[in-house]
Image (cartoon, rainbow, N blue to C red):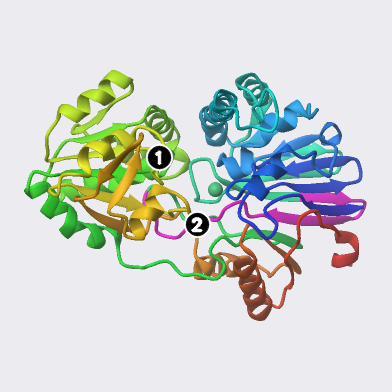
Amino acid sequence: MLRLGFHGAAHTVTGSRHLLESDGARVLIDAGLFQGLKALRELNWKKPAFRPEKVDRVVLTHTHIDHAGYLPRLVREGFAGPVHCTPGTGELAGLLLMDAAKLQEEDADFANRKGFSKHTPALPLYTSEDAEQAIARLTAADYDVWMPLGDKLQARFKNAGHILGSALVEARVNDGDRTRTLVFSGDVGGYDMLLHPDPTPPPACDALVIESTYGDRLHDKTPLADQIAAPLGRTLERGGVVVIPAFAVGRAQQIVLLLNDMMTSGRLPSVPMHIDSPMAIDATRIYARHLRDHTLDADVVAARLCPPNLQFSRTTDESKRLSALSGPRVIISASGMLSGGRVLHHLAQRLPDERNLLMLVGYQAAGTRGRALLEGAKTLRIHGQDVPVRASFLVAHGLSGHADADGLMRWLRACPSPPRAVFVTHGEPAAAEALAQRIGKETGARTFVPILGATFDLDTILG
Ligand SMILES: [Zn+2]
């Protein structure tokens, strides 16, 4: 018996939860939180269609919340097995799951104070203690090491090049005299990216589960340095401050590498840089420790990640001191979509001054301040004040953690032989359908775009 159930990231990009059932083993690949629209977020509160206490173990592809953020709730719902992950994923999970729990607790607290919850009192989806329980279940295994997951089931991780510790999972099910191989892509990183290696090609397999975040889109190929050299150079030369809102894990470190290289080569004036985010500081240290997973010249990259002109602001006082400093300088802070965090203080202070520059990197979701700016907002509401936007702003492309449609096809074609069945997940419907069609046409594989809750009998499909 071999079955595969899709309990999230089906026709959407969040909530990755794939249940692999074989004789004697029930393994959940990823335990992601649904994020974004309210209808999706409400799914996190519903009991899953499978019974958490009957799941033997979880295998995590990486630590992003849409892949790992349901774990504390899963433990609360009765899951009591080990959670397998790479060492890098394990360390980042300590950071990201505790942060997610804190946000859940703050949301519940806020709802109670404002009295807008249907429930009295409003409860968090999970607490810091639940997150600690989940973190205690993490069991690290290095890339390429086979892990026994049951009598007849084993799996190993291969580097997916998406964020630190990210992996694709190769699972082998030995069913008497027949062995089936299944590959789960997790999130597939782009090629030739800063800081992260190219994704490892998928091993030969019978069935592949592939993400499709950018299944119908192509990234701007203009080198990032060419996009930003002129506007950043002008800002710094006139004594302005460049504010860069960035996701704390991965993105903040890529930006430091890029700017440091441009300053060292003389493409940008050498100015002080600040990372103002405790989580980004911790993530930088974790990155520096695990660089050997990623690159051969680990010591060189570690030095470039923490150059002498980079200063870290960990405490609130250290953060406040930055507002007394004049340009030229660069301030990197979270959150990346301007939806909260310390970056709001910097924006309130720096946006009204036309000498300054705000550089947005990455996707700006509907409803966020980042999106409002893209749509031409002349003021931003921050901490109850309307802040005039006189600083210039720039949107930089090229730091996406995901391969685009061509990148996904390049990765898939690197598979030694095309899989017979491909399940396309982790994409909006149009992106997933477009990628499925392309895969079918270019590789001859039978493709499926599962809906939420669909379970497939692989014995029948694979024959
Ligand atoms: Zn991810």
Mark 1: C-beta under 8 Å from nearest atom of ligand 1: no
- 414 vs 289, left or right, is right
Identify the residue shown where x is 58% and y is 40%.
65
Is 179 part of what is drawn in magenta? yes
What's the amino acid at mark 2?
His
- 34 vs 94, left or right, is right
Q: List the residue tagged with mark 2.
A: 402
What's the amino acid at mark 1?
Ser
User: How far is the residue under mark 1 from the one under mark 2?
Assistant: 19 Å
Is 43 part of what is drawn in magenta? no
Q: Are marks 1 and 2 in contact (CB under 8 Å)?
A: no
- 257 vs 22, left or right, is left
Asked whether the viewer can see residue 302, the reply is: no
| Of the two numbered discs 1 and 2 in the rendering, the one whose residue sits closer to the viewer | 1
Identify the residue shown where x is 65% and y is 44%.
41
Q: Quadrant of the C terminus?
A: bottom right
How far from the left and from the top, in percent, is residue 21? 85, 47
Mark 2: C-beta under 8 Å from nearest atom of ligand 1: yes
How far from the left and from the top, in percent, is residue 208? 71, 60
Magenta residue span? 172-194
Quarter of image, res 303: top left
Q: Which element is circle 1 on?
A: loop
Q: Which element is circle 2 on?
A: loop
Neighbor class of circle 1 (other Cα within 10 Å; few <14, some 14-19, many 20+) is some
Asked whether the viewer can see residue 218, the reply is: yes
Disc number placed over residue 16 in the picture, else none: none
Residue at the left extreme of this rendering: 238
How far from the left and from the top, in percent, is residue 164? 48, 41
Residue 130, placed above or below residue 395: above
Q: List the residue tagged with mark 1.
A: 335
Residue 204, placed above or below residue 379: below
Q: Nearer the viewer, residue 210 or 106?
A: 106
